[in-house]
Image: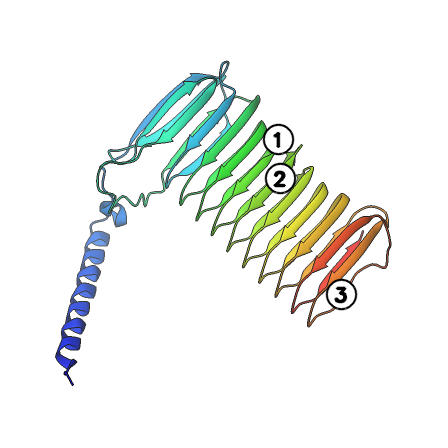
Amino acid sequence: MKDYTQIKNYYKIAGTSVGIGIACMTIGVLLSGNGFKGLTSGGAYTNRTVEYSSKNISALVINEKQAEVQLKIGDTEQIVVHLKENSLNSYTTEVKDGVLYINKQDSKESMLFNLNLDQEKLLVEIPAKQYDSVSISNRDASVNAEDLNVKSLTIDTSNSSITLSDIEAENDITLHNSNASLNLDTVSCGGSLRAITSNSSVNAENVKANDLTFKTSNASINCKTMQAETIDLTSSNAHIEAYEISIQKGLSVVTSNGHIEGSLTGKDDYSFTCNTSNGSCRIPNSRGAKQVTLKSSNASIDFDID
């Protein structure tokens, strides 16, 4: 049988050398006074501002990568786009058929150290009016929108949060995320509102929609003061709390390994179906037309009517 002792020793020496090298590089970077910013390539950032008249723009499409997107109401009748760029992070903007496109460009250089550790922000200021549609896609960075009036809104990102405040949509709102939270405060939707993430929480207050769906996994759903014809709240391995809920047709709350608690508003016109294991069901004894389904496992369920 071969003796691998010497080979193992070589691996140990190599591993130790790599570790020492990384430690030395880290100490050198920190002592330089620039932190880890020195590891990013592309050179220093420069600021560029682009302005468009909003009169002929009815929709926005924003495609970002690795930088926070913030959409807010500005002080002028112009759409103002604030860009921070270097050789690895640049943008194109154009208006076509009434749509303003803002696109982060793919770098032709090596992306090995293009980590964007500064988390630069793409800020877009728009006049207060209704827009036909707003679509925002991002990757590894957050999206924040406030005081927005649209017919439809679509946001897709990953590994960082989506936050909406004071949003009014005539039709649908679709939010998709992964590994980060969804946060909604004072959001009104005339159609369907679907907010889906994973491994992080959904938090909502003062939300209205025709049909409302919150879905996550391995994290909680926490909501208060919501109104819709139908509401569907789904998670796993975490609790769901839903208070001051108003429905016209039905409510479904489903999780596993977590408790469910909350309250419904209005008269005693609900019918409850409650299922759990290794826990208790505490629900009102009512037999109304509005259907309420509550399901969990290994935890209690406690729901009431205010």
Q: Mark 3 points at which residue?
A: 281
Mark 1 residue type:
Ala
Q: Which of marks 1 and 2 is in front?
A: 2
Q: Mark 2 points at which residue?
A: 193
Where is 258 relative to 159, above or below?
Answer: below
> Of marks 2 and 3, which one's residue comes earlier in the chain?
2
User: Residue 167's x, y, as percent?
Assistant: 60, 33
Distance from the alpha carbon under mark 1 to that under mark 3 = 37 Å
Mark 3 residue type:
Cys
Where is 256 relative to 164, above or below?
Answer: below
> Of marks 1 and 2, which one's residue comes earlier in the chain?
1
Decide if residue 214 is on the left or right side of residue 283: left
The residue located at (26%, 33%) in the rendering is 86
Quarter of the image where one finds residue 47: top left
The quadrant the N terminus occupies is bottom left
Dot 2 lies on which element?
A: strand
Decide if residue 201 is on the left or right side of residue 39: right
Dot 3 lies on which element?
A: strand
User: Residue 80's x, y, as percent?
Assistant: 43, 23
Mark 2 residue type:
Leu
Badge 2: residue crowd in 10 Å (few <14, some 14–19, many ≥20)? many
Query: Is the Cβ of the residue at disc 1 closer than 8 Å to that at disc 2?
Result: yes
The residue located at (34%, 26%) in the rendering is 92
- Furthest-bottom residue in view? 1
